[in-house]
Image (spheres, rainbow, N blue to C red):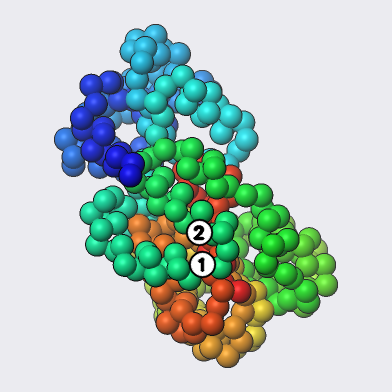
Amino acid sequence: MEQELWQYLKQTTKPIVLYGMGNGADKIINVLETKGISFQGVFASDGFVRDKLFHGHKISSYAELKQKFGDMIVLLCFGSSLPGVIENILKIAAEQELYAPEVPVIGGGLFDYDFLHKNAETLKWVYDRLADETSRKTFENIIYYKLSGKINYLLDCEVSQDEPYTSFLKLNNDSFLDLGAYNGDTALDFAKRCKNYNSITAVEPDKKTFKKLLLNTEHLENFKPINACISDKCETVNFKMLGGRNSVLGDGKDQINAITVDSLNFAPTYIKMDVEGEEVAAINGAKQTILSHKPKMLISAYHRTDDLITIPKAVLDIRDDYKIYIRHFSYLPAWDTNFYFV
Protein backbone atom coordinates (compact mmCIF):
# COMPACT_ATOMS: atom_id res chain seq x y z
CA MET A 1 0.00 0.00 0.00
CA GLU A 2 1.19 3.53 -0.78
CA GLN A 3 2.58 5.68 2.00
CA GLU A 4 0.29 8.54 2.94
CA LEU A 5 1.57 11.78 1.43
CA TRP A 6 1.35 13.86 4.60
CA GLN A 7 3.33 11.28 6.58
CA TYR A 8 5.99 11.20 3.87
CA LEU A 9 6.27 14.99 3.78
CA LYS A 10 6.70 15.06 7.55
CA GLN A 11 9.62 12.61 7.32
CA THR A 12 11.44 13.88 4.24
CA THR A 13 14.70 15.81 4.43
CA LYS A 14 14.25 17.31 0.96
CA PRO A 15 13.16 20.94 0.62
CA ILE A 16 9.45 21.27 -0.13
CA VAL A 17 8.26 23.95 -2.55
CA LEU A 18 4.81 24.94 -3.74
CA TYR A 19 3.83 25.29 -7.39
CA GLY A 20 1.02 27.82 -7.61
CA MET A 21 -0.74 30.40 -5.49
CA GLY A 22 -4.30 31.22 -4.53
CA ASN A 23 -7.03 29.28 -2.79
CA GLY A 24 -5.56 25.84 -3.48
CA ALA A 25 -2.20 26.83 -2.08
CA ASP A 26 -3.87 28.39 0.98
CA LYS A 27 -5.64 25.10 1.74
CA ILE A 28 -2.48 23.03 1.30
CA ILE A 29 -0.46 25.43 3.48
CA ASN A 30 -3.14 25.14 6.17
CA VAL A 31 -2.75 21.34 6.21
CA LEU A 32 1.05 21.60 6.21
CA GLU A 33 0.95 23.97 9.18
CA THR A 34 -1.52 21.76 11.05
CA LYS A 35 0.82 18.79 10.62
CA GLY A 36 3.98 20.73 11.46
CA ILE A 37 5.42 20.52 7.94
CA SER A 38 7.42 23.47 6.60
CA PHE A 39 7.98 24.54 3.01
CA GLN A 40 10.91 26.46 1.63
CA GLY A 41 9.67 28.24 -1.48
CA VAL A 42 6.88 29.10 -3.88
CA PHE A 43 7.07 29.26 -7.65
CA ALA A 44 4.65 30.09 -10.43
CA SER A 45 4.63 29.60 -14.17
CA ASP A 46 6.93 32.12 -15.83
CA GLY A 47 4.10 34.41 -16.93
CA PHE A 48 2.81 34.68 -13.35
CA VAL A 49 6.05 35.38 -11.50
CA ARG A 50 5.63 38.65 -9.59
CA ASP A 51 7.88 40.70 -7.36
CA LYS A 52 5.80 40.07 -4.24
CA LEU A 53 5.46 37.69 -1.33
CA PHE A 54 3.09 34.77 -0.81
CA HIS A 55 2.86 33.53 2.79
CA GLY A 56 6.22 35.16 3.47
CA HIS A 57 7.99 33.64 0.46
CA LYS A 58 9.12 35.49 -2.66
CA ILE A 59 7.34 34.19 -5.73
CA SER A 60 10.05 32.61 -7.84
CA SER A 61 10.29 30.76 -11.12
CA TYR A 62 10.88 27.02 -11.27
CA ALA A 63 14.35 27.64 -12.70
CA GLU A 64 15.28 29.87 -9.75
CA LEU A 65 14.24 27.30 -7.15
CA LYS A 66 15.86 24.48 -9.11
CA GLN A 67 19.12 26.42 -9.09
CA LYS A 68 18.74 27.14 -5.37
CA PHE A 69 17.73 23.68 -4.14
CA GLY A 70 18.53 21.22 -6.91
CA ASP A 71 16.62 18.13 -5.82
CA MET A 72 13.31 19.11 -4.18
CA ILE A 73 9.71 18.07 -3.64
CA VAL A 74 7.12 20.03 -5.62
CA LEU A 75 3.53 20.26 -4.41
CA LEU A 76 1.02 21.16 -7.12
CA CYS A 77 -1.36 23.74 -5.67
CA PHE A 78 -3.81 24.42 -8.51
CA GLY A 79 -5.97 22.52 -10.95
CA SER A 80 -5.97 22.48 -14.73
CA SER A 81 -7.12 20.49 -17.73
CA LEU A 82 -5.26 22.63 -20.27
CA PRO A 83 -2.90 20.45 -22.33
CA GLY A 84 -0.09 23.01 -22.26
CA VAL A 85 -0.28 23.38 -18.48
CA ILE A 86 -0.37 19.62 -17.94
CA GLU A 87 2.59 19.22 -20.30
CA ASN A 88 4.58 21.68 -18.18
CA ILE A 89 3.57 19.88 -14.96
CA LEU A 90 4.79 16.60 -16.44
CA LYS A 91 8.09 18.18 -17.46
CA ILE A 92 8.67 19.26 -13.86
CA ALA A 93 7.56 15.83 -12.63
CA ALA A 94 10.22 14.24 -14.85
CA GLU A 95 12.90 16.23 -12.99
CA GLN A 96 11.56 16.38 -9.42
CA GLU A 97 9.33 14.50 -7.02
CA LEU A 98 5.96 16.09 -7.73
CA TYR A 99 2.75 15.48 -5.82
CA ALA A 100 -0.75 16.94 -6.07
CA PRO A 101 -2.05 16.93 -2.49
CA GLU A 102 -5.72 16.03 -2.17
CA VAL A 103 -7.58 18.76 -0.29
CA PRO A 104 -11.36 19.16 -0.57
CA VAL A 105 -12.76 21.84 -2.87
CA ILE A 106 -15.63 22.32 -0.40
CA GLY A 107 -15.85 21.38 3.28
CA GLY A 108 -13.24 19.87 5.54
CA GLY A 109 -11.53 16.61 6.32
CA LEU A 110 -8.83 14.74 4.43
CA PHE A 111 -8.98 11.48 2.50
CA ASP A 112 -6.19 9.92 4.53
CA TYR A 113 -5.66 6.45 6.01
CA ASP A 114 -7.77 7.33 9.00
CA PHE A 115 -10.66 8.19 6.67
CA LEU A 116 -10.00 5.06 4.61
CA HIS A 117 -10.10 2.75 7.63
CA LYS A 118 -13.24 4.34 9.05
CA ASN A 119 -15.06 4.02 5.74
CA ALA A 120 -13.52 0.84 4.32
CA GLU A 121 -16.75 -1.15 4.45
CA THR A 122 -18.78 1.50 2.63
CA LEU A 123 -16.07 2.05 0.02
CA LYS A 124 -16.05 -1.72 -0.60
CA TRP A 125 -19.85 -1.59 -0.95
CA VAL A 126 -19.54 1.11 -3.63
CA TYR A 127 -16.74 -0.79 -5.39
CA ASP A 128 -18.84 -3.96 -5.52
CA ARG A 129 -21.70 -2.02 -7.14
CA LEU A 130 -19.59 -0.62 -9.99
CA ALA A 131 -20.73 -1.85 -13.37
CA ASP A 132 -17.53 -2.40 -15.35
CA GLU A 133 -13.81 -2.96 -15.07
CA THR A 134 -12.94 0.60 -16.12
CA SER A 135 -15.03 1.90 -13.21
CA ARG A 136 -13.36 -0.46 -10.75
CA LYS A 137 -9.88 0.55 -11.94
CA THR A 138 -10.81 4.24 -11.82
CA PHE A 139 -12.23 3.92 -8.30
CA GLU A 140 -9.08 2.19 -7.05
CA ASN A 141 -6.78 4.67 -8.77
CA ILE A 142 -8.64 7.67 -7.38
CA ILE A 143 -8.29 6.26 -3.85
CA TYR A 144 -4.57 5.53 -4.34
CA TYR A 145 -4.10 9.07 -5.69
CA LYS A 146 -5.96 10.66 -2.77
CA LEU A 147 -3.73 8.85 -0.30
CA SER A 148 -0.38 9.30 -2.05
CA GLY A 149 -0.75 12.50 -4.09
CA LYS A 150 0.91 10.69 -7.02
CA ILE A 151 -0.46 11.96 -10.31
CA ASN A 152 0.45 8.81 -12.24
CA TYR A 153 -2.67 7.19 -10.75
CA LEU A 154 -4.81 9.87 -12.41
CA LEU A 155 -2.96 9.72 -15.71
CA ASP A 156 -3.35 5.94 -15.75
CA CYS A 157 -7.15 5.97 -15.48
CA GLU A 158 -8.19 9.00 -17.51
CA VAL A 159 -10.47 8.51 -20.51
CA SER A 160 -11.66 10.82 -23.28
CA GLN A 161 -14.79 12.95 -22.90
CA ASP A 162 -16.40 10.79 -25.60
CA GLU A 163 -15.90 7.45 -23.86
CA PRO A 164 -19.01 7.43 -21.60
CA TYR A 165 -21.25 8.25 -24.55
CA THR A 166 -19.88 5.46 -26.70
CA SER A 167 -19.71 2.94 -23.84
CA PHE A 168 -22.92 3.23 -21.83
CA LEU A 169 -24.51 6.69 -21.89
CA LYS A 170 -26.70 6.49 -24.97
CA LEU A 171 -28.51 9.72 -25.85
CA ASN A 172 -31.62 9.80 -28.02
CA ASN A 173 -34.46 12.34 -27.89
CA ASP A 174 -33.45 13.20 -24.33
CA SER A 175 -34.71 15.96 -22.07
CA PHE A 176 -31.58 17.35 -20.41
CA LEU A 177 -31.48 19.01 -16.99
CA ASP A 178 -28.17 20.83 -16.57
CA LEU A 179 -27.55 21.66 -12.90
CA GLY A 180 -24.59 23.97 -12.49
CA ALA A 181 -24.81 25.00 -16.13
CA TYR A 182 -21.96 27.52 -15.83
CA ASN A 183 -21.58 29.45 -19.11
CA GLY A 184 -23.52 26.93 -21.19
CA ASP A 185 -20.59 24.70 -22.12
CA THR A 186 -22.25 21.45 -21.06
CA ALA A 187 -25.59 22.40 -22.61
CA LEU A 188 -23.84 23.09 -25.91
CA ASP A 189 -21.93 19.82 -25.67
CA PHE A 190 -25.17 17.95 -25.03
CA ALA A 191 -26.85 19.61 -28.03
CA LYS A 192 -23.99 18.42 -30.26
CA ARG A 193 -24.13 14.87 -28.93
CA CYS A 194 -27.93 14.58 -28.98
CA LYS A 195 -29.01 16.40 -32.12
CA ASN A 196 -32.61 15.20 -31.77
CA TYR A 197 -32.93 16.31 -28.14
CA ASN A 198 -36.35 17.11 -26.76
CA SER A 199 -35.46 19.98 -24.41
CA ILE A 200 -32.69 21.54 -22.32
CA THR A 201 -33.27 23.15 -18.92
CA ALA A 202 -30.17 24.89 -17.55
CA VAL A 203 -29.91 26.03 -13.92
CA GLU A 204 -27.08 28.40 -12.95
CA PRO A 205 -27.01 30.52 -9.76
CA ASP A 206 -24.20 33.01 -10.41
CA LYS A 207 -25.63 36.15 -12.02
CA LYS A 208 -22.55 37.09 -14.05
CA THR A 209 -22.11 33.56 -15.33
CA PHE A 210 -25.84 33.34 -16.05
CA LYS A 211 -25.51 36.30 -18.44
CA LYS A 212 -22.76 34.42 -20.30
CA LEU A 213 -24.99 31.34 -20.36
CA LEU A 214 -27.79 33.32 -22.00
CA LEU A 215 -25.44 34.76 -24.62
CA ASN A 216 -23.78 31.45 -25.48
CA THR A 217 -27.03 29.49 -25.80
CA GLU A 218 -29.29 32.03 -27.50
CA HIS A 219 -29.38 29.93 -30.68
CA LEU A 220 -30.55 26.73 -28.95
CA GLU A 221 -34.14 25.63 -29.44
CA ASN A 222 -36.36 24.31 -26.64
CA PHE A 223 -33.97 25.84 -24.12
CA LYS A 224 -35.07 27.05 -20.68
CA PRO A 225 -32.54 28.95 -18.50
CA ILE A 226 -33.16 29.36 -14.76
CA ASN A 227 -31.14 31.68 -12.51
CA ALA A 228 -31.30 29.77 -9.21
CA CYS A 229 -29.34 27.28 -7.17
CA ILE A 230 -30.33 23.67 -6.65
CA SER A 231 -30.83 22.29 -3.16
CA ASP A 232 -33.04 19.92 -1.15
CA LYS A 233 -35.64 22.58 -0.37
CA CYS A 234 -37.14 25.69 -1.93
CA GLU A 235 -36.11 28.81 -0.03
CA THR A 236 -34.10 32.02 -0.20
CA VAL A 237 -30.43 31.42 0.62
CA ASN A 238 -27.20 33.37 1.01
CA PHE A 239 -24.89 32.84 -1.92
CA LYS A 240 -21.30 33.87 -2.58
CA MET A 241 -21.14 34.97 -6.21
CA LEU A 242 -17.60 34.84 -7.54
CA GLY A 243 -18.39 34.99 -11.24
CA GLY A 244 -17.18 31.47 -11.99
CA ARG A 245 -17.10 27.82 -11.01
CA ASN A 246 -16.12 28.67 -7.43
CA SER A 247 -19.40 30.39 -6.58
CA VAL A 248 -20.92 28.56 -3.61
CA LEU A 249 -23.68 28.51 -1.06
CA GLY A 250 -22.42 30.08 2.12
CA ASP A 251 -22.13 33.30 4.02
CA GLY A 252 -22.08 35.53 0.97
CA LYS A 253 -24.00 38.79 0.98
CA ASP A 254 -26.03 37.93 -2.12
CA GLN A 255 -29.39 36.23 -1.81
CA ILE A 256 -30.86 33.89 -4.40
CA ASN A 257 -33.71 31.44 -4.76
CA ALA A 258 -32.92 27.81 -4.08
CA ILE A 259 -35.14 25.31 -5.85
CA THR A 260 -35.40 21.53 -6.03
CA VAL A 261 -35.45 19.30 -9.07
CA ASP A 262 -38.84 18.00 -7.94
CA SER A 263 -40.24 21.55 -7.91
CA LEU A 264 -39.61 21.86 -11.66
CA ASN A 265 -42.42 19.36 -12.29
CA PHE A 266 -41.08 17.76 -15.43
CA ALA A 267 -39.51 14.48 -16.41
CA PRO A 268 -35.85 14.83 -17.45
CA THR A 269 -34.29 11.76 -18.99
CA TYR A 270 -30.71 12.94 -18.36
CA ILE A 271 -29.47 15.06 -15.45
CA LYS A 272 -26.02 16.55 -14.93
CA MET A 273 -25.17 17.65 -11.39
CA ASP A 274 -22.02 19.71 -10.91
CA VAL A 275 -23.14 22.00 -8.11
CA GLU A 276 -19.98 22.78 -6.16
CA GLY A 277 -20.37 20.35 -3.29
CA GLU A 278 -24.18 20.45 -3.02
CA GLU A 279 -24.63 17.24 -5.00
CA VAL A 280 -26.17 15.22 -2.16
CA ALA A 281 -28.65 18.02 -1.41
CA ALA A 282 -29.53 18.13 -5.12
CA ILE A 283 -30.10 14.36 -5.15
CA ASN A 284 -32.33 14.57 -2.09
CA GLY A 285 -34.31 17.35 -3.75
CA ALA A 286 -34.82 15.12 -6.79
CA LYS A 287 -36.20 12.11 -4.90
CA GLN A 288 -39.62 11.98 -6.57
CA THR A 289 -38.14 12.65 -10.02
CA ILE A 290 -35.65 9.81 -9.57
CA LEU A 291 -38.29 7.46 -8.17
CA SER A 292 -40.80 8.15 -10.92
CA HIS A 293 -38.61 8.50 -13.99
CA LYS A 294 -35.16 6.98 -13.27
CA PRO A 295 -33.25 9.56 -15.35
CA LYS A 296 -29.69 8.89 -16.41
CA MET A 297 -27.43 11.01 -14.20
CA LEU A 298 -23.91 12.40 -14.34
CA ILE A 299 -22.89 13.54 -10.84
CA SER A 300 -19.55 15.19 -10.08
CA ALA A 301 -17.57 13.38 -7.39
CA TYR A 302 -14.60 15.60 -6.58
CA HIS A 303 -15.80 18.46 -4.38
CA ARG A 304 -16.02 16.90 -0.91
CA THR A 305 -13.79 14.41 0.89
CA ASP A 306 -16.60 11.84 1.19
CA ASP A 307 -18.12 12.17 -2.31
CA LEU A 308 -17.10 8.62 -3.26
CA ILE A 309 -19.36 7.39 -0.46
CA THR A 310 -22.19 9.86 0.01
CA ILE A 311 -23.19 10.29 -3.63
CA PRO A 312 -23.76 6.58 -4.47
CA LYS A 313 -25.48 6.07 -1.12
CA ALA A 314 -27.83 9.02 -1.68
CA VAL A 315 -28.87 7.75 -5.13
CA LEU A 316 -29.24 4.09 -4.20
CA ASP A 317 -31.20 4.97 -1.06
CA ILE A 318 -33.84 6.36 -3.44
CA ARG A 319 -33.75 3.45 -5.87
CA ASP A 320 -31.25 0.63 -6.01
CA ASP A 321 -31.69 -0.53 -9.61
CA TYR A 322 -29.14 1.86 -11.14
CA LYS A 323 -25.95 0.66 -12.78
CA ILE A 324 -23.04 2.77 -11.49
CA TYR A 325 -20.04 3.87 -13.52
CA ILE A 326 -17.20 6.24 -12.63
CA ARG A 327 -14.89 8.02 -15.05
CA HIS A 328 -11.99 10.46 -14.74
CA PHE A 329 -11.18 12.90 -17.54
CA SER A 330 -7.87 14.66 -18.10
CA TYR A 331 -7.44 16.99 -15.12
CA LEU A 332 -4.86 17.51 -12.41
CA PRO A 333 -5.64 17.06 -9.55
CA ALA A 334 -8.63 14.64 -9.50
CA TRP A 335 -11.22 17.18 -10.60
CA ASP A 336 -13.53 16.14 -13.44
CA THR A 337 -14.18 12.77 -11.84
CA ASN A 338 -17.81 11.80 -12.26
CA PHE A 339 -20.27 9.10 -11.26
CA TYR A 340 -22.79 7.98 -13.87
CA PHE A 341 -26.06 6.34 -12.91
CA VAL A 342 -27.79 4.52 -15.76
* Front in this rendered view, residue 29 or 96: 96
CA distance separating discs 2 and 1 = 6 Å
Q: Quadrant of residue 70?
A: top left
Quarter of the image where one finds residue 182: bottom right
Q: Residue 41: x, y in percent?
A: 32, 22
Count of marks, rendered view? 2
Q: Quadrant of the N terminus?
A: top left
Which residue lies at the image location 38% right of the left edge and 40% below the top edge?
149
Is residue 167 shown left or right of residue 45? right
User: Which residue appears at 56% of the width and 86% of the height?
Assistant: 289
Indicate whether 256 appears above or below 208: below
The one nearer the camera, 267 or 298, is 298
Q: State the SS at label 2.
A: helix
The furthest residue to the right:
196
**Residue at which label 2 appears:** 136
Question: What residue sits right under mark 1 in the picture?
Answer: 130
Question: Around disc 1, counting alpha carbons within 10 Å, would you say few (fewer than 14), some (14 to 19), or many (20 or more)?
Answer: many
Q: Earlier in the sequence, mark 2 or mark 1?
A: 1
Please name the amino acid that badge 2 sits on. Arg
SS assignment at label 1: loop
Query: The C terminus lies in which quarter of the figure?
Result: bottom right
